Image: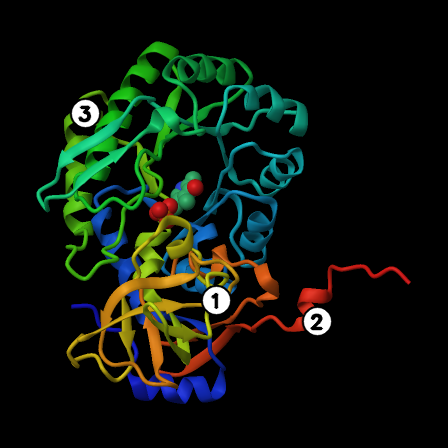
Amino acid sequence: MKRPFVTKEQLEALTQQFPTPLHLYDENGIRQTARKLKAAFAWNPGFREYFAVKATPNPAILKILREEGCGTDCSSLTELMLADKCGFSGQEIMFSSNDTPAEDFRLAHKLGAIINLDDFTHIDFLKETIGTIPETISCRFNPGGVFTLGASAEGFQVMDTPGDSKYGFTREQLFEGFKKLKAMGAKRFGIHAFLASNTLSNEYYPTLAGILFRLAVELEQETGCDICFINLSGGVGIPYKPDQPANDIAAIGEGVRRQFEEILVPAGMGDVALCTELGRFLLGPNGCLVTKVLHFKHTYKEYVGVDACAANLMRPAMYGAYHHITVAGKEDAPCDHKYDVTGGLCENNDKFAVDRMLPEVELGDLLVIHDTGAHGFSMGYNYNGKLRSAEVLLQSDGTARLIRRAETPEDYFATLTFEE
Ligand SMILES: *Cc1c(COP(=O)(O)O)cnc(C)c1O
C-alpha cells in the first residue's frame, strides 16, 4: 500500500502557508535513496551518479544531491547554467545531449563537462565549434533492434525498441568514431547507453552492463582507445502502482558487479569507473503533487475537479501514466467510490485518474498525487494560461521551505509584446 510521506496535519499547516497546487519534496527520502544507490555501487571506486537534471531542475534539490556526492547530467544550455550556478564544475557535469546547438557545446566545454556525443557527425561539429577535441570524451551507443529482458522474476516483461529511437551511434559508427576521436587527440573514453525506460526489474542494469562491458573490451582491443568509464544512464524505474514491487538497488548493484568481475576484470579492465544518470529512481517517489478539491460534477460519470491540471503534471495526459492518489486523512478508509479526477484545461485528456476507486471525497479535501518528484514539475507548461505552481521542500527537521515560488500573471505576461 502506498502512503504519502506527509500527514494530513502537516499538509493542512503547509497549505496555510503555501497555496495549492504545489509540488512537495521529501529531503529525508531523497538523501536515503541517494545513499542506497551509492552503497549499491560502493564496490566500484570510481562510481558516480550524475543526477538527470531534467527530472527535477531545482537548486535546492541539486544542492542536496551534491552533498550526497552526486554530479549532474545536463542536456541543454540552461541545464548547464543551472548546474554551474549550483556549484557543479568540471567532470562533475555530464553533458548528454542530442541534436545539440553549438552554444551548448561551447558552454559544456567551458565548464569542463564530460561531453557525451550522440552522433558520429557531432565529432566534426564539436571540433569546428570548440576548436579542439577534449581529452576526455564519451559516445552514446544504440544497438538497434529490440531490447528485451523477458519476464523478470517479478513477472514484468521489459521491452523497448532502440531501433526506433533517435539516440546514439550504431555499432559500426562507434568503432569508427573512437578511432577518429583518438586520431583527433582524445585520450580517455567513455561509453553510454539508455535502452529502456522506467524498468521494474533488477535485471535491467546488469543486462545493459553485460552488453556495454563486452563492447568496451572489443572497442579497446580493436581501436586501442583507453576506456575509462561506462555510463549506465537512466532507466531504473519506480512502482507507480501500489501492487508493483520496487526495484532493489542493492541487488542491481550486485548484478552489475558480477558482470564486471566476469567480463571487465579478466580483460584487464578492472579499473573502469561506472556512472549512472538516474532521475526518476532518485526523485520520483520523493515528491508529490498536492491539490485541493474544488468541485464535483455528476453527469454521465462522477467527476472530482481539483485545482491542479495537466500543466502541473503532464504524465497522465501525455502517456496515460498511472499516478496513485491518496485523499489526505482518509488513508485507511475503504475505496468504495469511483471517480474521474480532473483538472481544468480545455482538453479532455486532462484527467489525473479515470474510473479510480477512492474513499468518498469531500469539497476542500487535499489529494496527494504520488510519485511526481521526477518529470513532474519539470514537464510543466502554460497552456490555457495556467501558471506553474510553487515547489516546497519538506526538510529533514520537519519544516517546510519554499524552493520555487509559484508563477504570477506578471510572469506569464513578461515575454509578451503589445502593439500600441
Ligand atoms: C532522461 C534521461 C535520464 C534519466 O532518466 P530516468 O528515467 O529519469 O532515470 C538519464 N540520462 C539521459 C541521457 C536522459 O535523457
Q: CA distance from mark 1 to mark 2?
A: 24 Å
Q: Report the mark closest to the observer, 3 or 2.
A: 2
> Residue placed at 18% from the left, 74% from the top?
335
x and y percentages locating residue 136 in the rendered image: 48, 30
- Which residue is the extreme one toward the right? 420
Query: Which quadrant would residue 305 be assigned to in this image?
Result: bottom left
Q: On residue 410, which mark appears?
A: 2
Asked if residue 201 lies left or right of residue 112, the reply is left
- Which residue is the extreme one toward the left? 153
**Contact between labelled residues 2 and 3, with CB atoms less than 8 Å apart:** no
**Element under label 2?**
helix
Amino acid of disc 1: Ala
In the picture of the structure, the residue carrying the numbered disc 1 is 60
x and y percentages locating residue 377 in the rendered image: 47, 61
Asked if residue 245 lies left or right of residue 191, the reply is left
Is the CB of the residue bearing disc 1 within 8 angstroms of ligand 1?
no
Badge 1: how crowded within 10 Å, few (<14), some, or many (20+)? some
| Front residue (pair 162, 313) | 313
Query: Which quadrant would residue 351 be assigned to in this image?
Result: bottom left
> Residue placed at 35% from the left, 83% from the top?
365
Badge 3: how crowded within 10 Å, few (<14), some, or many (20+)? many
Asked if residue 347 lies left or right of residue 242, the reply is right
Amino acid of disc 2: Glu
x and y percentages locating residue 61 in the rendered image: 44, 63
Q: On residue 247, which mark appears?
A: none
| Front residue (pair 260, 142) | 142
In the picture of the structure, the residue carrying the numbered disc 3 is 263
| Front residue (pair 193, 417) | 417
Residue 408 in view in this figure: yes
Q: Is residue 270 above or below residue 346?
A: above
